[in-house]
Image (spheres, rainbow, N blue to C red):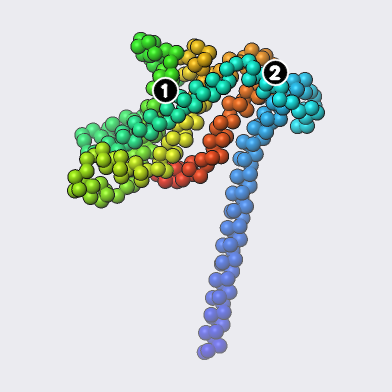
């Protein structure tokens, strides 16, 4: 009897060990597949960037040489010097920073206030208002260009910073992100503050905003990047060269080059450089913001 029980325990232990070995083997395979997919996507993003950098450092004569090669016979910064001399690049950098920072800041303020009202203030039609805001995500920005242009032309705001900034402040995605985050904050905090005599604005500014730093970071970074990359609308409303944003200014300079690949790639690198710096500095904030805003599922 004792021998039978011992054999059964040994069999159970062997089965458990085999199951653990199989599970760990599957986990290793899954991890390797994930790493492989991650490396593949990283190469898809890095190879064009490295190719643009490599081409920008070549003399113009080498950019059309056949066969194409990564090697540079005589590296040079002549393409960058040409781009910088051809336009007001530093002024365009300043314009893009001013516009993008203002858009990010004002989007955070307006979107968070709208989301607080939709999340915490009960009023008739709040759900309908929220769905109307979400419907704005499905409307392409190109469909609003003509009415927006006529509106700003009527009030004399064409060729000003505000003509670029104001249309970008209305961000339905930002409202959605903040509302999802605010919905996850316990109502007990708000009720305790109301009992203590706090106003709605006090609750919003002293309780909800400090708790929503991940959402603020996510909205700020993504709005900044989107505003920096915005090309079509600034191209239409900014006619003065000193007021142009960097993408618009570099496009006007590049159009005069013809087929000069080194200069075109140098323009692309100069335009993308600030975004790379922002990502490298705030990548942890980006991950925390996405993980903490309710977008994860």
Q: Is residue 146 visible?
A: no
Picture coordinates of residue 249 (x, y %)?
Answer: 56, 18
Q: Is residue 109 visible?
A: yes
Report the residue at 31% width, 34% height from top: 113
Q: Callout 1 environment at 10 Å: few (<14), some (14 to 19), or many (20+)? A: many
Picture coordinates of residue 61 (x, y %)?
Answer: 77, 20
Dot 2: element: loop
Residue occupied by mark 2: 260
Q: Nearer the viewer, residue 185 or 35?
A: 185
Picture coordinates of residue 147 (x, y %)?
Answer: 38, 15
Q: How many marks?
A: 2
Question: In whole angstroms, how far apart are the C-alphas of marks 1 and 2?
Answer: 33 Å
The quadrant of the picture occupied by the C terminus is top left
Name the side, left or right, on which 74 lies relative to 230. Answer: right
CB atoms of marks 1 and 2 within 8 Å: no
Q: Nearer the viewer, residue 245 or 123?
A: 245
Residue occupied by mark 1: 165
Name the side, left or right, on which 18 lies relative to 56. Answer: left
- Is residue 41 shown above or below 189? above
Dot 1: element: helix
Report the residue at 57% width, 17% height from top: 88
Please report whichever mark, 1 or 2, sits nearer to the chain's N-terminal start: 1
Q: Nearer the viewer, residue 147 or 109?
A: 109
């Amino acid at each position: 009897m004792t021998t039978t029980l011992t054999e059964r325990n040994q069999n159970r232990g062997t089965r458990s060990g085999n199951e653990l070995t199989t599970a760990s083997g599957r986990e290793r395979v899954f991890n390797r597949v994930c790493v492989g997919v991650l490396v593949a996507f990283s190469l898809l993003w890095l190879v064009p960037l490295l190719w643009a950098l490599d081409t920008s450092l070549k003399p113009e004569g080498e950019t059309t040489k056949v066969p194409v090669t990564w090697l540079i016979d005589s590296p040079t910064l002549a393409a960058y010097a040409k781009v910088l001399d051809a336009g007001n690049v530093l002024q365009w950098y300043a314009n893009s920073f001013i516009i993008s920072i203002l858009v990010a800041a004002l989007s955070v303020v307006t979107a968070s206030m709208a989301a607080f009202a939709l999340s915490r203030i009960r009023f008739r039609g709040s759900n309908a208002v929220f769905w109307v805001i979400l419907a704005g995500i499905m409307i392409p920005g190109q469909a609003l260009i003509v009415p927006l242009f006529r509106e700003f032309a009527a009030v004399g705001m064409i060729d000003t910073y505000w003509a670029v900034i104001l249309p970008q402040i209305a961000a339905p995605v930002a409202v959605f992100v903040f509302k999802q985050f605010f919905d996850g904050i316990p109502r007990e905090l708000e009720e305790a503050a109301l009992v203590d005599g706090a106003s709605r604005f006090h609750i919003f500014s002293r309780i909800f905003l400090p708790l929503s730093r991940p959402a603020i970071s996510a909205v700020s970074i993504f709005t900044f990047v989107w505003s920096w990359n915005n090309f079509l609308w600034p191209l239409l409303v900014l006619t003065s060269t000193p007021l142009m944003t960097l993408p618009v200014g570099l496009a006007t300079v590049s159009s005069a080059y013809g087929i000069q690949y080194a200069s075109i790639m140098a323009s692309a690198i100069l335009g993308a450089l600030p975004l790379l710096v922002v990502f490298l500095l705030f990548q942890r904030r980006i991950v925390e913001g996405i993980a903490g805003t309710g977008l994860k599922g």
